[in-house]
Structures are given as structure tokens and as C-alpha cells.
């Protein structure tokens, strides 16, 4: 099956996170026809689950290297404003070339299709290839890739290298790859007071001034100046809530939320402890939820494989970057070195999400080169 046909089939499966069922059926059918042993399982209970996941493997000779492709087939809700149905892939001929429209075309059903199409022509004797595909990357990511990692460990199927197909390119296919990502922690802050009448403040305890002072101290923090590969960590106030419907009542409680994106000078635990100490000084509490730690695959053999493959097919050498949000690479780093590379990200999560048909074909060739070089040490 061509990469475009497979991308159309995957887009045609409505798979708003957490994805289950038809989109995995379509992927399983193609992988099994390519000689892969496919394992599907559902993990987790509400509210974060259930989540469907897929692990597929085609083993090479004993002792051969193991290369993994990783990605997700869940998508964000389409929203409004589309000029064609978001889950009915549509090809359009436009001045710059043919485009394929549909939710997930870029993030990241297009890349998943390119991975599968790429390995169909990689000879089995080259080595072991696996697919690590979740239905919950766009959601809480609690029962997705982390559950897949547990399965792989139980089975002893640990890859030597892993490529995640997130849309990393910015202006044109191949201009950027991700060798790392910052970590992320959200912290819920709360200050309790005593409710009372505004005319009798001595009989009440207003929590708002203490929360404001807490937020001012947090906002003034300079966490670091950045590193060789990471931009400075940043703390942002993302919510402030009192919920007081009455103008003449001192509220009993005030809440806020902050989000910290942090580099490898910190951990989720160290930042949570630091914020917790500040909150305590102002008579408040802090509840942290760490969604991922930072990761870095330093430039070396793996990044060279990716860069060489991209340059061979596009004529440009990708910039190695750690910018942007988080991805499931934050979990996969526990198994092996991981790099992200994929399509141009300009339309991801937008109405009329679209990918250039020629980019899908080029990405397939790039992925084939990467897989062969990772397994055999030789470019295609």
C-alpha cells in the first residue's frame, strides 16, 4: 500500500484521543501483511482510560540490532472551520503541489503511514524493527506509551535506538530534528482563609493577598540561564481562581495554577519542592503534577544517521533542537536513545490540517534510510 493511501485510510478513522478500534484495525492489517507480529492491548480505567495501544515487531537474526519507530494515532478534536470533513481525507491540487487534508495528516498519522511504508522495503535480514504506537499521546498520556514500555520490558524487546515521528520540521521538510525536550510540571496552588463580611475584616482572613504575594515571588524567579542545548526554564502563571459571586464577602479560599517548562538543570521533584517551600511561606499549599522530565540525546552517531538521511533526500541538514512542547519521547528515553523527526508542523492542531503529498513520499524514503543505517551502519 502506498504511503498516501495508508495515510488516507488512517485519517478516515475518527480517533479523537483516546483512540480505539478502527484506526488500530487499519494499522494492524498493514503491519501483519508486512510480516509483523502485532500485539494490541487496552490499559487503564476512567477518567484517563481506557486507552488502546499497539506494539508490533518483525525480528531479524538473533543478535541483530533493534530499531523502533514510535508514534500515536490519536488526534485532537477537529473543532470548526474546516472546508472539508476532517475525517474524510481529501487530496487537492494546489499551486505548490498536491496536499492531503484531514485531522492527523501532520500530527501524526502521515508520519505513521510513512514509517510503515518505509519498512515494507527494508529486508528482514537487516535487523529487528518494531512499532510503538499509542492512542493517548494527545490526552493525559497516562496509559499510553508508559504502558507500552512496561510491555516491552516484560517481553525483553528493548530497542537500541528509537525514532519518534512528531512533526518537527518548521518551514520545509527536513529543517529541524529534536534531540531533546524540556520537562513539564503543573502545580496547583491554594491558600485558605476565613470567610467574612468586608465591613468586618478583623473577623475574617482574606486569602487573596497571600496568594498574590506568593505568585509575585514565583513570577520573579529566575530558574536558570539555559544550557548549551536548552533554552532557559520558564515559569508561567496559567490560572487564577477565587469564584466569589458576592461583592461584600471576603472569600474563604483562593487558588492558582502555574506551569513550568524546565531544562536538564532541574527535575520535576526539585522544582515541586522549591515551589512548595514558597507556597508554605505564604500560608498555602502546592500540588504538583509532573507530566515529563527533560531528555537529551547528545549529538553523536544517532543524530548523524538522521541528519545524513535527511540531507540525502532533501539537500538540507536539519538543525538539532530542543525547542517546543513535550512528546512521548520523554518516556521512551528510559529505554534507549531517542530522536524526533517528522513533517512540517505549520498546520498541526488547526482547521484544514494538511500535508504535502510529496513530503509524505520523501519522508518515507528518509525513514527507510534511517532504519537501514541504524540496523546495518550503511545508508540506503
Image (cartoon, rainbow, N blue to C red):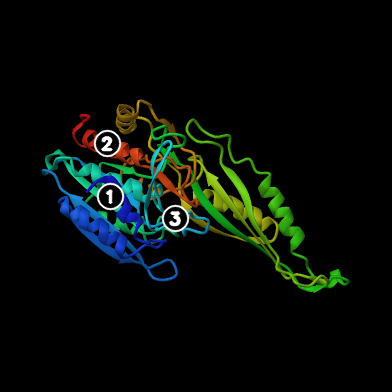
User: How dense is the environment of label 1, judged by Cα within 10 Å: few (below 14), some, or many (20 and up)?
Assistant: few
**In the image, 89: left or right of 192?**
left
Task: Examine the image and state in which quarter residue 304 appears.
Answer: top left
| Circle 1 SS class | helix
| Circle 3 SS class | loop
Mark 1 = which residue?
5
Q: Nearer the viewer, mark 2 or mark 1?
A: 1
Mark 3 and mark 2 in contact (Cβ < 8 Å)? no
In front here: 61 or 318? 318
Q: Nearer the viewer, mark 3 or mark 1?
A: 3
**In the image, 357: left or right of 130?**
right
User: How dense is the environment of label 2, judged by Cα within 10 Å: few (below 14), some, or many (20 and up)?
Assistant: many
Q: Nearer the viewer, mark 2 or mark 3?
A: 3
User: Can residue 128 be seen in this snapshot?
Assistant: yes
Q: Earlier in the sequence, mark 2 or mark 1?
A: 1
Q: Quadrant of the C terminus?
A: top left
Q: Position of residue 68 (x, y in %)?
A: 26, 45
| Above or below for 280 versus 42 | above
**Residue ID at (47%, 46%):** 347
Task: Examine the image and state in which quarter residue 53 appears.
Answer: bottom left
User: How dense is the environment of label 3, judged by Cα within 10 Å: few (below 14), some, or many (20 and up)?
Assistant: few
Q: Position of residue 170 (x, y in %)?
A: 46, 37
Count of numbered tags = 3
In front here: 379 or 266? 379
Q: Position of residue 259 (x, y in %)?
A: 58, 52
Q: CA distance from mark 3 to mark 1?
A: 18 Å
Mark 3 = which residue?
84
Q: Position of residue 109 (x, y in %)?
A: 35, 51
Mark 2 = which residue?
365
Amino acid at each position: 500500500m502506498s504511503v498516501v493511501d495508508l495515510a488516507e485510510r488512517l485519517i478516515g478513522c475518527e480517533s479523537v484521543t483516546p483512540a480505539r478500534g478502527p484506526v488500530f484495525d487499519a494499522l494492524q492489517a498493514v503491519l501483519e501483511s508486512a510480516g509483523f507480529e502485532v500485539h494490541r492491548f487496552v490499559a487503564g480505567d476512567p477518567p484517563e482510560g481506557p486507552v488502546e495501544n499497539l506494539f508490533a515487531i518483525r525480528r531479524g537474526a538473533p543478535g541483530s540490532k533493534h530499531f523502533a519507530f514510535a508514534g500515536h494515532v490519536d488526534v485532537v478534536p477537529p473543532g470548526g472551520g474546516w472546508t472539508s470533513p476532517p475525517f474524510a481525507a481529501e487530496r487537492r491540487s494546489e499551486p505548490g503541489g498536491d496536499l492531503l487534508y484531514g485531522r492527523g495528516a501532520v500530527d501524526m498519522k502521515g508520519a505513521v503511514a510513512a514509517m510503515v511504508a518505509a519498512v515494507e522495503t527494508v529486508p528482514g535480514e537487516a535487523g529487528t524493527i518494531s512499532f510503538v504506537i499509542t492512542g493517548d499521546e494527545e490526552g493525559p498520556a497516562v496509559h499510553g506509551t508508559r504502558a507500552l514500555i512496561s510491555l516491552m520490558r516484560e517481553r525483553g524487546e528493548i530497542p537500541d535506538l528509537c525514532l519518534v515521528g512528531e512533526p518537527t520540521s518548521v518551514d520545509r521538510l527536513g529543517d529541524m530534528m529534536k534531540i531533546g525536550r524540556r520537562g513539564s510540571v503543573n502545580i496547583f496552588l491554594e491558600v485558605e482563609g476565613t470567610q467574612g463580611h468586608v465591613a468586618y475584616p478583623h473577623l475574617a482572613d482574606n486569602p487573596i493577598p497571600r496568594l498574590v504575594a506568593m505568585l509575585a515571588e514565583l513570577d520573579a524567579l529566575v530558574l536558570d540561564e539555559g544550557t548549551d542545548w536548552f533554552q532557559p526554564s520558564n515559569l508561567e502563571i496559567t490560572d487564577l481562581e477565587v469564584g466569589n459571586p458576592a461583592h461584600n464577602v471576603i472569600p474563604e479560599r483562593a487558588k492558582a495554577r502555574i506551569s513550568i517548562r524546565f531544562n536538564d538543570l532541574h527535575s520535576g521533584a526539585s522544582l515541586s519542592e522549591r515551589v512548595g517551600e514558597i507556597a508554605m511561606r505564604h500560608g498555602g499549599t502546592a500540588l504538583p503534577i509532573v507530566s515529563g522530565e527533560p531528555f537529551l540525546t547528545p549529538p553523536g552517531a544517532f543524530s548523524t544517521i538522521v541528519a545524513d538521511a535527511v540531507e540525502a533526500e532533501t539537500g538540507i541538514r536539519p538543525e538539532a533542537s530542543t525547542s517546543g512542547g513535550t512528546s512521548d519521547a520523554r518516556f521512551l528515553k528510559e529505554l534507549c536513545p531517542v530522536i524526533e523527526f517528522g513533517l512540517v508542523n505549520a498546520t498541526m492542531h488547526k482547521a484544514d490540517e494538511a500535508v504535502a503529498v510529496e513530503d509524505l513520499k520523501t519522508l518515507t524514503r528518509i525513514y527507510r534510510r534511517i532504519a537501514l543505517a541504524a540496523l546495518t551502519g550503511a545508508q540506503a
